[in-house]
Image: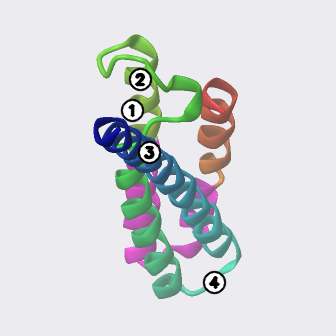
Amino acid sequence: MRKHVIAMLSASLLFSSVSLYAADLEQDMDTLNANLKIVKKTDDAQEMQQALTKMRAAAQDARKGTPDKLEGQPADSAQVKDFHAGIDSLIAQIDVVSTLAKANNVDGAKREAAKFDDIRNANHKKFR
């Protein structure tokens, strides 16, 4: 009886940690979305830079996760590598926009920030 209880508790802890991990990916995506709205609306280079810093941190954390659609895929599978490549392209674009914001070129940063939508749409189509 005791072995059954221990096995059930172990299984429930395992599955709850998987759920928490998935929630982290969802939180990262929410953080990206909320800060993207700030980047698109603000005319203040400093506020834009702060939002981009948060976006970069969330993207780096999201890279550690796995979308529900890819659960069970090996880490070296083509689909998981494609997911990582999508996150990497997002991080690279965040860096481009961030460089412009640091140079106080808000208009240029907003033009480059428009590319975030393309990256998001392409990757959501594949992994959502």
Q: How many marks?
A: 4
Element type where label 2 sits in the image: helix
Residue depicted at 46% across the width and 86% down the height: 46
Q: Earlier in the sequence, mark 4 or mark 2?
A: 4
Rendered-image quadrant of the N terminus: top left
**Camera-nearest residue between 57 and 19:** 19
Element type where label 4 sits in the image: loop
Observer-side mark, 3 or 2, equals 3
Instruction: Estimate how packed mark 2 is, as few (under 14), some (14 to 19) or many (20 or more) residues with alpha carbons within 10 Å.
Output: many
Q: Earlier in the sequence, mark 1 or mark 4?
A: 4
Q: The magenta stretch spans which residues?
A: 90-113
Is residue 108 left or right of 102 when viewed as pictured? right
Residues at marks 1 and 2 touching, judged by CB atoms closer than 8 Å: yes
Residue depicted at 52% across the width and 78% down the height: 48
Residue bearing mark 3: 12
Callout 1, which amino acid? His
Tell me if residue 96 is in the magenta stretch.
Answer: yes
Q: Earlier in the sequence, mark 1 or mark 3?
A: 3
Question: Could you tell me how far apart the alpha carbons at marks 4 and 3 are, in whole angstroms?
Answer: 48 Å
Is residue 36 left or right of 81 when viewed as pictured? right
Callout 3, which amino acid? Ser
Residue bearing mark 2: 80
Callout 2, which amino acid? Val
Q: Earlier in the sequence, mark 3 or mark 2?
A: 3
Q: Taking 83 as reference, is 24 above or below it?
A: below
Callout 4, which amino acid? Asp
Residue bearing mark 1: 84
Residues at marks 3 and 2 touching, judged by CB atoms closer than 8 Å: no
Residue bearing mark 4: 43
Element type where label 1 sits in the image: helix
- For the rendered model, the colour scheme is rainbow
Question: Could you tell me how far apart the alpha carbons at marks 1 and 2 are, in whole angstroms?
Answer: 6 Å
